[in-house]
Amino acid sequence: SERYNARDAEPRWQRLWDEQAIFVSKNDDSRPKYYVLEMFPYPSGRIHIGHVRNYTLGDVLARFMRAKGFNVLHPMGWDAFGLPAENAAIERKVAPKAWTYDNIAAMKKQLRSIGLSLDWSREIATCDPSYYKHQQKMFLDFLREGLAEREKRKVNWDPVDMTVLANEQVIDGRGWRSGAVVEQREMNQWVFKITKYSQELLSALDTLDRWPDKVRLMQRNWIGRSEGLLIRFALDAATTPAGESELKIFTTRPDTLFGAKFMAISADHPLAQAAAAKNPELAAFIAEIKKIGTAQEIIDTAEKQGFDTGIRAVHPFDPSWKLPVYVANFVLMEYGTGAIFGCPAHDQRDLDFVNKYSLGNTPVVCPEGQDPKSFVITDTAYDGDGRMINSRFLDGMTIEQAKDEVAKRLETELRGNAPVGERQVNFRLRDWGISRQRYWGCPIPVIHCPKCDVVPVPDADLPVKLPDDATFDRPGNALDHHPTWKHVTCPKCGGKAQRETDTMDTFVDSSWYFARFTDPWNENAPTTPAVANRMLPVDQYIGGVEHAILHLLYSRFFTRAMKATGHIALDEPFAGMFTQGMVVHETYQKADGTYVQPADVKVEVGGNGRRATLLGTGEDITIGPIEKMSKSKKNTVDPDDIIETYGADVARWFMLSDSPPDRDVIWSDERVQGASRFVQRLWRLVNDSVELGKGAPTARPASFGPDATLLRKAAHGALDKVTTGIERLHFNVCLAHIREFTNSFSEILQRPGQPSADLAWAIREAGQILVQLFSPMMPHLAEECWQVLGQSGLVSEANWPQIERDLLVEDSVTLVVQVNGKKRGEVTVATAAQNPEIEAAVLALDAVKLALDGKPVRKVIIVPKRIVNVVG
Ligand code: ANZ
Ligand code: ZN
């Protein structure tokens, strides 16, 4: 038979699948549903190899579940708002909308060429008014429900992109895109009240047992729950500015109160402001430390600095004990109360601080087994377990007991009418600031009226559409510059008013697209609740671990907020989550350090290992480390090139073959070529099997001879293993089983002579099973083979083969044979063999006779399925 020609076959099958709408899923389908979703792409212009991996993983599962009889929902769309479109507008003078839709068209073509089983009838682009109209509606619903609010906030301002950034978009104090040093500004911002759900978002993580532990842990840490105590420290009146009398702190370690050496407050704390009013030096210090901003990484790494305000606080358990109050750069206003007491012996930051300002330390927790008298702290704080020391009435207690004792005493002690201490749970999670000063995003549908303040845009006026004629000739928000767009009349009083010109963070767009996919045709509402509730949750979501925190957390919040506003009736959007590894590749550098593309390098394996030279010039090239594919390192491969050269099936097979899907896979041309050879091998094998299976009877033979049984066992064994492998997403293991089965299959096909009728039947069966097994991974080749097998219809629509469990039973077992406890050999017997049979087989072994050396057998001990010990 001829070689398999992917270039001819692949587009042909893609067209056919399309024409017959094979992968379109209907909402009124009565079969059980299965929702497979991969994170939808940003339309940057080109599909990259990471997309190919992501979508192939999802596609294998989708095709498999379809064959298993599910109504599979496998949609695709575009996360289409965002900065790059505006940058393109600035750099290339092309409108963001045109740029985006051109990219979508180009990428859609690329996606089609991969042969994905996608339901394109549900395609959505988040920049389409028919999508963001509903997002605006939900914003207004959230506003009514108290889940959206306007708030004056200190924000990270990117002076180059001229926009507010979320904390996570600030990396090492710089904007994630512009790289500019981020400034702090107070601005009116729209926020979503995600913190209303802090505890719920945390607790529900325990129910997500089909999520990676790693991701759940990251979310837990991000939410950051801590149990602690609020303590009101009295301030020494003589040292305190008028109007101030106490300092409220939050601590998770009230047990360490007797080790306190100082108090510290944030530069933004009102007490700091009050003290600075009379102290220019302090005011200057505050101005200085505010420059470093609020980004967590910076604060954690910056040198600890403080300034003594002169104010003294009174220890809650000892009126004569006065503690100095510092303004310190490591205390954040946004967490707890913006004030702390410092216990240097047991907190590293506090220790660094006292060591700088010579305030000393007193250990109050002593590790078990350590003599308290010799326990001193110098440079390393002790944060482990132990018993209380130097702590008066707490001495001898465990940390937990001491925490409880302090809480009890301070809870019951009153000052004024209020208790001095109060137990409190704090979360690190902040409300989600969604305002962005950008054009290419979803407009926030409110109007600012000088008389009526903030007025929601009436539902009937939605969507608030972006103007198509924005200009990008100066920095800042093009919506704000637009000559007419923002000028409107107030819907309430009819007076002159202005539209909100902030647009929503693009994370909002991706927080509910999975729900929209369930009924993207509904023009009147974001979802059709009855449909959404039936089709959700997403059964398997697949994407990069870079979205492990924000996107997933925001989506979990959004689902709850949509439930609160009646759009949906569930809490958790993603029942199963899978984070895929990256595609990585070696890097190649010239002597001058510039990177060159893999395509321009020749790698040879010689006596001294691998050596690389530049094609053409023969210049020496340094082989660098294996890294994530990136444009800057030039270690990318273009999916189009691969598909053009080898076909989509080869690219898909390679993506699945080498590593478990959650690990990185190293791109290797040799292995891609290996996959390509395997495709031809399968093609030949299937054709040969048709040839040899020709004489097979239509009816299943009443019995099978040894060869046929061997083949049937191999086929059903592979079927069994691939089935569970796909269910567990162990795709690389599945591929190994398919290869193994291919080997046994071709061995049998190569036997000389014409196969008997039963073997011919088994060959035909094995051919069918083989094609179905690889059909989720290499669907085009599988369709082509399916035809060769003489099957009617499409393999994409065939039911998954039934496993004959009887064939999976191992019919022989191998036992270790010992004589007087020493291993002498092995024996293989029928699984069904009884003890006398086994005994006879063992005693007949030469090795056993030799070891017994003529002595009589006293006993034979048989450990079923494992060991036979002959005692002589
Ligand atoms: C005294 C103490 C002694 C503390 C000790 C720790 C160890 P988590 O677990 O993250 O909630 N803290 C409280 N508010 C702060 C703020 N706004 N900025 C910086 N630090 C703040 O951390 C709680 C601990 O972080 C609190 O407990 C407080 O220091 C500090 F041996 O109080 B601790
Ligand atoms: Zn008005």
Image: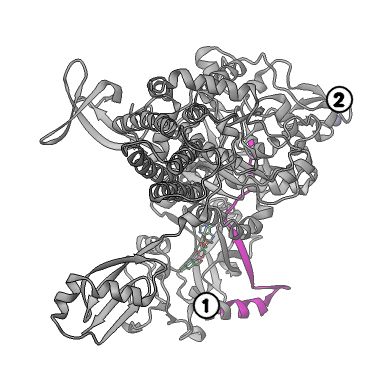
Which residue occupies 79% across, 46% down? 145
Q: Is mark 2 within 8 Å of ligand 2?
A: yes
Query: Where the N terminus falls, by quadrant?
Result: top left
Bounds of the magenta segment: 406-435
> Quarter of the image holding residue 514?
top right
Q: Is residue 265 magenta?
A: no
Q: Which mark is residue 400?
A: 1
Along the line of sight, the residue nearer the viewer: 767 or 451: 767
Report if residue 471 is visible in the image: yes
Side (left or right) of 858 relative to 434:
left
Label 2 residue SS: loop
Is residue 577 positioned above or below 514 on the image? below
Residue 512 in the image: state x and y as whole percent: 67, 39
Along the line of sight, the residue nearer the viewer: 438 or 108: 108
Q: Is residue 429 magenta?
A: yes
Side (left or right) of 123 relative to 109:
right
Is residue 743 positioned above or below 326 on the image? above
Residue 55 in the image: state x and y as whole percent: 51, 34
